[in-house]
Each structure stands twice: as C-alpha cells, then as structure tokens.
Image (spheres, grey):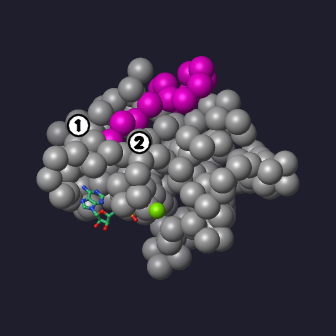
Amino acid sequence: MSFLFHTTRPEETLALGAVIGARLTVGQVVGLDGPLAAGKTWIAKGIVQGIGRCDQALIKSPAYNLIHEYPLETAPWFICHMDFYRLPTLSPADALLFSEVLERTDAICLVEWASKFLGDLVPDYLSVTLAKTGTAGERTIQVKAHGASEQYVALARRIHADAHAPA
Ligand SMILES: Nc1ncnc2c1ncn2[C@@H]1O[C@H](COP(=O)(O)OP(=O)(O)O)[C@@H](O)[C@H]1O
Ligand SMILES: [Mg+2]
C-alpha cells in the first residue's frame, strides 16, 4: 500500500517531513529516494523537525561523509542521516558499518538514495520517494512500507491520516 502527496514549494515538503517525523519511533528507518534536487534533504530536515528539537544547522546532506549523527535536545537518542549517493557498490566493510548504524536501538535512521542498497541491509523500512513533476516546484512524494513488516504499513497509514487531517 502506498500513499501519494503533492507539494509545490520546499516549505510544503518540509511540512510533510515534519508530519512523518512526528510519527516515527526510535529504532525505525526511513529510506529517501528521488533524483538529484528532488528534495530528499528538504524532507529530511522536516523529518528531523518532526522527531524533536535539534540543532538545525547540523542538518546537511551527508553525501561526502556518508553518515551524520544529530543528537536530539528533547530525547536521549540520535538521528543518523546517511547517503549512498557516492557509493558505486556496497563493500563488505561498508555493509558492516551501515548495518551497525541501522541496527542501533538509540537512533532513527534517515537514508538518502536508499533504493541502491538499503533493502540489502534491512528487510523493512519506510520508503519515501520524491519525483519532480510539472513546473519547477512541483513534487509528488510517495510514502510506503518497504518489506512485509506491519509496523511500517501502520506508520504509512498514520502519516496519510495526519497529513489530511483538518488543521
Ligand atoms: N516542492 C519542493 N520540495 C522540495 N524542494 C523543492 C521544491 N520545489 C523546489 N525545490 C528546490 O529543489 C531543491 C531540492 O534540494 P535537496 O533537498 O538538496 O535535493 P536532494 O537532496 O534530493 O538532492 C532545493 O533547491 C529546493 O529549493
Ligand atoms: Mg541531498
């Protein structure tokens, strides 16, 4: 089951990210996909805002460092922001490193360019795929459970309900 959302400005993508973030619980994994400049880092910023308070200046695309870790000011755990963009293949050493982070029970993981390798590392995650459509600012954003786990199906449903709830 998947849900489709439409945004026309970065701020709307940020707001949808905040709805997603507010529903996440520690230990969960979100995979972000879509072409360059689709808005993966924008929605990641929104997701971080929705999870809790942390230093927004820290949130940058981790394309060069592969993994960024943001401590939360409002909870005793972390957000791990990863990016597979620069990895042509997943070496055994990389797989070990990413698996260790993805299995952390004190973190929520956000992974850009997830479809490259995330399915090889974890069976289940929330998949968020952004596409540029129409004119400059239009994006369609698909939210769905990757894998068979009921927790991500339920999560996708809650996000859909929250995003369509009257303000
Ligand atoms: N509806 C929208 N949602 C997200 N970004 C948008 C939107 N419309 C225009 N943009 C622009 O697209 C770019 C998205 O950048 P970024 O989030 O870094 O992309 P990615 O991480 O997917 O490469 C930004 O320059 C942003 O201002
Ligand atoms: Mg990015």
In the image, is the residue at mark 2 within 8 Å of ligand 1 by its beta carbon?
no
**Image spot of residue 9 (x, y percent):** 20, 59
Which numbered disc covers residue 129? 2
Find residue 164 and report its image quarter. Answer: top left
On the rendered structure, is 107 left or right of 97? Answer: left
Image depth: mark 1 or mark 2 in front: 2
Q: Badge 2 local density, few (<14 within 10 Å), some, or many (20+)?
A: many
Which numbered disc covers residue 94? none
Label 1, on which residue?
165
Residue range corresponding to the magenta coloring: 141-154
Q: Residue at x 74, y 49 (%)?
A: 90
Could you tell me which quadrant the N terminus lies in? top left
Front position in the image: 156 or 99:
99
Identity of the amino acid at label 2? Thr
Distance (Cα) linking label 1 and label 2: 22 Å
On the rendered structure, is 45 left or right of 88? Answer: left
Residue furthest bottom in the image? 57
On the rendered structure, is 84 left or right of 96? Answer: left
Dot 1 or dot 2, earlier in sequence: 2
> Residue 20, can we see it?
no
Task: Specify whether residue 147 is painted magenta.
Answer: yes
**Image spot of residue 162 (x, y percent):** 31, 38
